[in-house]
Image (tube, helix red, strand yellow):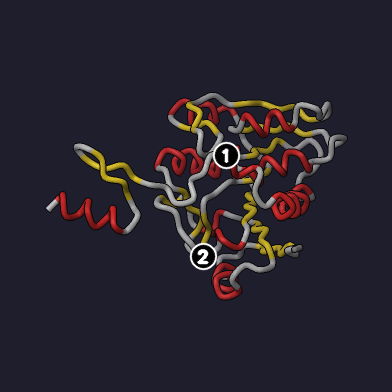
Amino acid sequence: MIRRDLRELSEAGECRRVYGGALRLQPNASHIRARMSEKIPLKNALARQAATLFKPRQVVFIDTGSTNIALAGSLPRDTPLTVVTSSPAVAVALSDADQIETIMIGGRLEGTTGGVTGSVAVQSLQHYRFDLCSLGVWAISAEGPSVWDHEEAAFKREVLSRSESVVIMAEASKIGSGGRFPVAPLETVQTLIVTDDAPTDELTRMTASGVTIIKVPVHD
């Protein structure tokens, strides 16, 4: 029975069979370094829009992900902020910003997301409350944001519980799909910034949660 289940999952692309068991596959789980070189103009457009939400003297959290790295590069360098991040690349992107205090939390570094996760990372959050959080996700639908790892989901839930306001940036391919592990209901997200080619039907369903949706034009 177990062998048949594993065979069916393997044929569906959900896992890769190995001796003695199987390894779960994460769709589109390319390394963060590879994703940083993809769709750069699109990510910069989303990031510039998100940057307008950050106000002087806020304590904010910037999560992992290539679009959040772009956000770090888009923040005005003359705006005093305290930025807490789980992403070394975000911290490096802010290293030239004299008015921004950058705090890296500890934890186990995960190569696919480029951020830290695990129990140490969750414990590191106990010291902070955030005025604003820019959350990185694998996908988002009317049910809420989701990811492909249970530890990552637990970490993001802790971030959300400590955030006054939450923004998510998402290109069209992330809208309406779902990761393996739900993070939280969509009601926990205040602002969703999307490309204007995102599926209209799904965006309409999302508005029922009260989330504010901001569309960013897609340029060829």
Q: Is residue 61 left or right of residue 96?
A: left
- Viewer-side residue, 34 vs 146: 34
| Residue 213 against residue 15 in the figure, above or below | below
In the rendering, at what x and y percent does residue 53 appear?
A: 76, 49
**Mark 2 or mark 1, which is nearer the start of the sequence?**
1
Q: Quadrant of the C terminus?
A: bottom right
Amino acid type, residue under disc 1 in the picture: Ile
Disc 1 from disc 2: Cα separation:
22 Å
**Which image quadrant for residue 8?**
bottom left
In the rendering, at what x and y percent does residue 167 appear?
A: 65, 51
| Residue 103 against residue 200 in the figure, above or below | above
Q: Residue at x 55, y 71 (%)?
A: 202
Q: Which residue is mark 2?
A: 176
Q: Residue at x 62, y 52 (%)?
A: 168
Q: Residue extending furthest right?
A: 78
Q: Residue at x 53, y 26 (%)?
A: 124
In the rendering, at what x and y percent does residue 46 appear?
A: 72, 54
Amino acid type, residue under disc 2 in the picture: Gly
Q: Residue at x 25, y 40 (%)?
A: 18
In the rendering, at what x and y percent does residue 55 appear?
A: 79, 43
| SS for callout 1 | helix
Give the label on residue 32, or none. Answer: 1
- Viewer-side residue, 91 vs 3: 3
Q: Is residue 185 left or right of residue 197?
A: left
**Which image quadrant for residue 163?**
top right
Q: Residues within 10 Å of mark 2 (few under 14, many from 20)?
A: many
